[in-house]
Image (tube, rainbow, N blue to C red):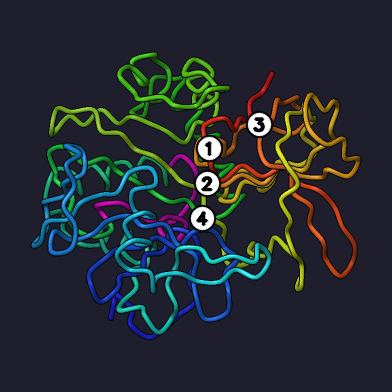
Amino acid sequence: EGVYGSAVQRLRDRDSIITAEGIIFRVYGYDHPPKAYICDVEYAPSSVYISTDPRALRDGGREKYYKFYADEGLKFVRKNYPKYSVYYEPLGTSLVGVKEKDIHRMVKPELKFRELISEESKDVLTKALKSIFDEVSVGTGLSISDFGVFGSLLHGFYNPRYSDIDLIVYGRKELNKLRSFLEDSYESGGVLENEFDSPTAVSGKTWRFRNYSLREYLKHQRRKLIYAVYMDRESGRRIKVEFEPVKRWDEIGSYYEAGAKVRRVGWIKALARITDDSDSPFIPSIYGIEVEKILEGERSADIIRIMSYVEEFRMQAFKDELVYVEGNLEEVLSPRGRFHQITLTYCDRYYDQALKVI
């Protein structure tokens, strides 16, 4: 079995599901319907999908795969494979996902990472992966079981000459140790540099957010510390390395009480103070807030949190910081009462949404 499980186990954020057609889904978040997983769609084999995007081809394995960007994967599955849809009770709607009975196999990032670190390096990329892990484990005291790997390395279709290294760090405490090590490494000129230290990190980047500028993005990404660049002597190239935070099993809980229902109220713009950032590194990123001022939208007194499913707004603000937030105001009705939240998610006004420190 190894990395590729077929008996259904419990899955969490960033675990991979492969269907009979070879479509690769990524489990999204931690709260799922019974016997099913809400997912994002990451890759599809050339037998079912061909992309014209020059960035999309992944041809380092036995079969050609194409990566989906933005909402391409969701659209592709909705149109061609509507059975990959699951009903999510709190929202009262169907989302793209996979039922347990449709899982052909699963790929676990933590097992693949262990395999890549333990076996003989096949190429310059897996050698670089080992060197990075050596540096990080010595500097943090973290062990092999605290990490996972995703992206093309997880699926074995990476290209040693130009693929990035996409890693997972499991756990809040582990993430804090890692960030503190990375900060030291960046400041002391260690082998890892902060990817966002230079404006060239965003040069040529397509940018669609209307209320969050590329300059603001650069500034916020720099503080997150989880986006690094490794200068690899052997291949002579600068390899991008990112460390994506995922919860440990004992940190996982539901975002909604049993029986809760979420109702969309309208659009809101507000200034708020962050009161709790402990769930901000994960997807969804949850921020406890106190609203200081509502600039537009319904004046609701009980907005208690921001819930963001947008990658760019993860780890975006820290406790006690003042933020500008723009997005969907929602009412959550549960057996124990009701409250409001501001949700940043896939919607018609996706690029109007914002969350930034001011």
Q: Quadrant of residue 305?
A: top right
Distance, label 3 to label 1, CA atoms, is 20 Å
Q: Nearer the viewer, residue 336 or 74?
A: 74
Residue type at the position of mark 3: Ala
Pointer 4: what residue? 170
Residue contact at pointers 4 and 2, CB within 8 angstroms: no
Q: Quadrant of residue 206?
A: top left
Secondary structure beneath label 3: loop
Distance, label 3 to label 4, CA atoms, is 20 Å
Quadrant showing the C terminus? top right
The image shows residue 298 at horizontal and vertical percentages of 83, 36
For disc 4, the neighbor class at 10 Å (few under 14, some 14 to 19, many from 20) is many
Residue mark closest to the camera, 3 vs 2: 2
Return the mark for residue 346: 2
Residue contact at pointers 1 and 4, CB within 8 angstroms: no
Distance, label 4 to label 2, CA atoms, is 26 Å
Residue mark closest to the camera, 1 vs 4: 1
Pointer 3: what residue? 317
Distance, label 1 to label 4, CA atoms, is 29 Å
Residue type at the position of mark 2: Tyr
Pointer 1: what residue? 350
